[in-house]
Structures are given as C-alpha cells and as structure tokens.
Image: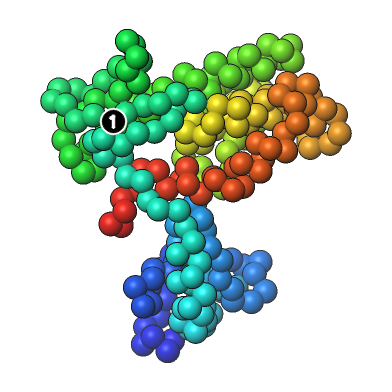
Amino acid sequence: MSPFGRTFVDGDRIEIAGAVIRLKVHPRARRVSLRLDRSRREVVATAPSPRRLGEAAAFARDRIDWIVARLGELPQAEPLVPGAELSLMGRPVRLVHQAGRARWRPAEDGRSAEITAQGEGEGFARAAQRLLRKQALEGLTALTRIHAEALGAPMPRVVLTDARSRWGSCKPPTGGQPAVIRYSWRLALAPLPVADYVAAHECAHLRELNHGPRFWALVETLVGDPAPHRAWLRTHGARLHAIGVDGAG
C-alpha cells in the first residue's frame, strides 16, 4: 500500500495541492521521475513498474513546488468561444455565435473569415473545431502538393491528427498504396511559413527517409534555412496546443 492509502494503476490521476498529476508506467524507466507534458498541460510521474507507482506519487508530492512552478509557465488556455480570434494558414479567423448549422464564411469586403456556430460551451467548441480542421486539411494539402510537385514525387495522402508529440510524419508508399503524410491540425494555427516548413520537411521524406545531409539539402531547396521555423515551434508550440482548451479545466 502506498503512503496515499491506496493502490495505483497505470493512468491514474492524483491531485496534490490543486495540481493534477498523471501516473504512468514505463518498463524501460530506471527510476521514478517527473516531466512536464507541455502539449497535454500536465505533469507525468513515471515509474518503472506498477508496484512503484505509489513511490512515483510520493515523489510528486515531495516535488510539488517544482510542479506548481512548471505548470505556471504554461501558456494561458485559449478556449474556442464566440468572439475568439485565431490565425489559420496565416489569415485571421473570427468565431461567431449564430443560429443554424455551423458554416465557414470566407473573408470578403475587408472582413476577416468567420466560423459561425450555434450552441455554447463544448457544443460550440466542437463545431468550431470541426470547421477549423476542415480548412486546415485544405490548406496543408495545398502546401503538400506544391512541395511534392517540386520534388517530382507522387502526391501522398494527407491525414490530420491531434498528435501531441510531433507536428508531422511521413509513411512511405507500401503495397501499391501512396505515401501518407500526417499533420497535427494545429499546425495550421502557426504562421504560414512555419506550416510551410513542416510540409516541406515531410515531403522531403518522400525522397529521403532519413535526416541526413541530402535530406536537409532538399528542405533548404524548398523553404530555405529551416532553423527559424524549428525555433518558432520549440518556443511557441505549446501555445498551439493550448488553443481549444477550456481555461476552467
């Protein structure tokens, strides 16, 4: 039995001084440890085995000052609510509450593009995110097509995810099926040159399934120096994952 008076299982969440910590078993871990998962906005206490989850929970309790400080560094949550203003593929988009089915209104007459939806709370947020993802798929597919054509590579299938640990991935063609490039839909919320860099990066894998010199030479041919875009994602990526998060949650 742990000092908390209970037995824990992988995936349990505990609250200590108002902070929520997720307990995780990782068989290859050598010791209990803590890490901040910026994309999920939570602290993870890892143990090498289920029987040591209680030890991981106790370790988190002893390091609560560190946990509170790290959580306090996270960007503020930005829920999808009426009146919110976002940037999608480099262009402003405003969320508007309006009766009727959710719809996309392109920018015109000096007005920014709008997503209109009814309902409130989670209902409004879900409807708004569906349309954001639809527009993101169109925009990221267009960038992918440009770079695939520049490389003389067949157009891959483009799929959107809500991946937390990577912005894109490329699966090579197999069994007569085309290659598949997956993007986090949130990439469309980044500045357009940053999204364009990730699209170029994944398309370069259509020719080089590695990160060797020839791969990076292809990326530079497509978008120039990738360093500023990589730095932007390291610095601001957590904010993209904060969009659509309920500030009360």
Q: Tell me if residue 208 comes above or below residue 29 in the rendering.
A: above
Q: Residue furthest left?
A: 99
Which image quarter holds the C terminus? Answer: bottom left
At horizontal 58% and vertical 19% (from top left) the residue drawn is 143
Specify the amino acid type for callout 1. Answer: Leu
Label 1 crowd (10 A; few <14 / some 14-19 / many >=20): many
Camera-nearest residue between 91 and 187: 91
Q: Tell me if residue 116 comes above or below residue 44 in the rendering.
A: above
- Left or right: 188 in relation to 168: left
Q: Tell me if residue 123 comes above or below residue 218 in the rendering.
A: below
At horizontal 34% and vertical 73% (from top left) the residue drawn is 18
Whether residue 171 appears in this view of the structure is: no
Percent across and percent down for residue 152 are 74, 11
Residue pointed to by mark 1: 95
- Left or right: 197 in relation to 212: left
Whether residue 186 appears in this view of the structure is: yes
Percent across and percent down for residue 123 are 21, 38
Percent across and percent down for residue 25 are 54, 68
At horizontal 61% and vertical 41% (from top left) the residue drawn is 232
Give the number of marks.
1
